[in-house]
Image (spheres, coloured by chain):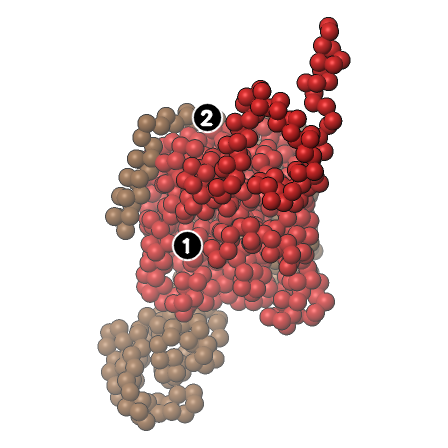
Amino acid sequence: MAEGYKAAAKRALAEQPHVRDSVTKATLHFNANRERAYGEVDAEAWRDWAAAVKRHLLGRLDEYLTEAESRLSAAGAQVHWAENAADVQKILDDLVERHGVRRVVKGKSMLSEEVEVNHHLERKGVEVFETDLGEYIIQLAGEPPSHIVGPAIHKGLEEIRALFHEKLGTRPDASPEELAAAARKVLREAFLTADMGISGANFVVAETGTVVLVENEGNIRLSTSAPRVHVALVGIEKLLPRAADLEVFLQLLARAATGQKIGTFVSLIQGPRRADEPDGPEELHVIFVDNGRSSVLADGEMYEALSCIRCGACLNACPVYRQTGGHAYGQVYSGPIGIVLTPGLKDPALAAELGYACSLCTACADVCPVRIPLPKQILAWRRRSVERGLAPAAEKLAFTGYAGMVTRPRFYKLGGKLLRLGRGLTGAPWLPVLGAWASGHGPLEPSPKSFREIWEEELGDE
Amino acid sequence: MSEARRRILERVRHALERRWPPELPGSPWRASAEGDPLEVFVKNAAASGIEVERFAGPQAAAAWLQEWAAGFASAAVSPLLPRSLAPDLPAAAPEDAELGVSRALAAVAATGSVLLSSAEGRRLQLLPPAHLVFVDESEVVWHLAEALEHLSKPASALALHSGPSKSADIGQIMVQGVHGPGRLVVAVVRGLAKAPAGKKRATRSKRKAKKTAPELDWQAVRELEGRTLRTKRGEPFTVVKVTDNTVRVRVASSGKEYTVRRASLEKAQRLVAAGTAVPGPVAYRKLVANEAPAYAWSLLRALGLI
């Protein structure tokens, strides 16, 4: 990460004010849809149930992983294991070599961003097409995704028009339908000529060895059906115990993400093309990827974050995310889940800045479909940063002093008096913590009398 | 990679030591089912942009179909469909057809979805701009979990389709038909399950014929040995040696030698057989392989494949 969250956020707000508008508009839209969709069902019960299934699964992850592996192998899929990005890249290199792969079509996958699939393949001379419309837009723009579900939500219609005009030669005032048609034309050719399709996975059912993919466009179904080879990148936490569990998870994911009853297309992939089938890939490769997940699993305070089903609801609900969009976080995962997962997957030191991209309003916990205790975990990262000495010294001093004062009644009383005497001081920019706080707020205006004084004056005799 | 497997599982087991996993909660939660699932299916499907038609029998459906399908020029039809329900249209490969026609395994009332199987082919469900899906009234179930029992059937992939292809990735404005079909029509027919499926044998034999055709004739390649050919730009080169797996060529002007692998030529052959144009070495390099594309392409031309 070249610059920290604070600097990136400041820059984003100053230099790209339209990002804030686009992101706010999109996330509020997502929020309204989710609220309506949650309201149509007994969402509280669904969320309790789904959270319990995921916690159970994480607690027996080793057993479910081996069960899924044996089911997949039995159905003719080839299962690979990758500890990190380099492992994934090596497995892909071998497949590219073996099958003479020149063109790859990709379905949206956050994990593929984590392990940098596109850059790697492109360096090897393989043409990579992102086929989700949003992903295609940002691939054309040379940017990473800024949202788990809507990778291009930071871009407004005007920006996309200009981009397509430049790259694809569409009219400068093309309608969204014309823009989509232009992308469809390029990508349709790619689907039909690609040698390999790469996807992620929303779920893998251990009981049946089914790779489950959810989408609205049909590009994932095409990427996993048209080319000769399909490779699915699967985070080791993506499992579900039983096929019947999909009943709730498919509906909960769609409701939490976009407010739909279910994703428009759900692929339930169980193996390569069978001899009696007219089409489908000749080979199915499933890569189970760790890339830091086992360390998160070992972390008693953080492991519940591995329940995440990547619906993006916490991003939409987050008032901080809404201001800058995802790019300011400088990481693959942004928003509340990004704050919690990134330091665990990559480097705990990242929490020193990311931990503060949060107002602790707890809106994320209110919407999470699998009840990840995000605010508690963000607070824990902040605590750890302080313990590791990563927090600014002045802040530490100020909070130690504050804690010392408010936990002793006599000092508390004295402090209140001082505050009322020196009311002008609270807006002073040089004060640690308070200064930073005051720069975004009006000065504190303490009441002339404390509650205690009023109590004693008015009710003291009774 | 088995080393990676061992280490990942070891780390996972280590992480889970002294942790007590909660019990797996019992039967998955389900909404209470009241009323007629068919009515609910129709309502939910329509709400997500599916056009639903209902028929009292296969004959009524067939009568409707012939009129309705007249608006299309060609169709790719599922081999699982009764012959009477195949539209009277010229057959086309899914990538060229204007209409794809499927026979669903089931329909789900709660989500307004149809469940499709790869047994009939996946491309015809995805590539044509319009998709017509037949399902029997008795196959409409309440819940996803009931439909998912079909997962035990032998098929490489099942899919739930719950509306036309759509995206709001351009400025939050909903656009239909982005990659998959922009129009999804579900015809619910009473008594469809009893109508005999047809066309299966015909399609299978056609596929077999198609599959054997693209074999590259290696003997023909061997016969090129010793011959002098020209590239697209007129540069002469000689086929020096043909082994079981490679072709070696020597450029006349520079004396340089290049190897073209059999696998690459076979791949090119498959692409051409599937209808992909490979008009020159640039396209060859892009679509097939970056190994001596100018000479490889000329070999294909000499073989009469391009």
The amino acid sitting under disc 2 is: Pro
In the picture, one chain is brown; tell me its letter: B
Quarter of the image where one finds residue A30:
top right
Q: Colour of chain A?
A: red
- The residue closer to the viewer here, B137 or A272, is A272
Note whether A156 is above or below A426 in the view shown. below
- The residue closer to the viewer here, A210 or A274, is A210
Please give the residue where the numbered disc 1 appears in the rendered image. Answer: A115
Quadrant, the C terminus of chain B: bottom left
Disc 2 chain ID:
B
Residue B270 point in image, percent of width and height: 41, 69
The nearer-to-camera label among 1 and 2 is 1
Disc 1 chain ID:
A
Please give the residue where the numbered disc 2 appears in the rendered image. Answer: B25
Q: Residue at x 25, y 48 (%)?
A: B3
- The residue closer to the viewer here, B157 or A107, is A107
Q: Is residue B8 left or right of residue A186?
A: left
Note whether A209 is above or below B122 in the view shown. above
Count all numbered tags in the image, as a single digit: 2
Q: Residue at x 43, y 66 (%)?
A: A122
Q: Secondary structure at mark 1?
A: loop
Q: CA distance from mark 1 to mark 2?
A: 34 Å
Q: Is residue A462 left or right of residue A311?
A: right
Residue B182 point in image, percent of width and height: 64, 55
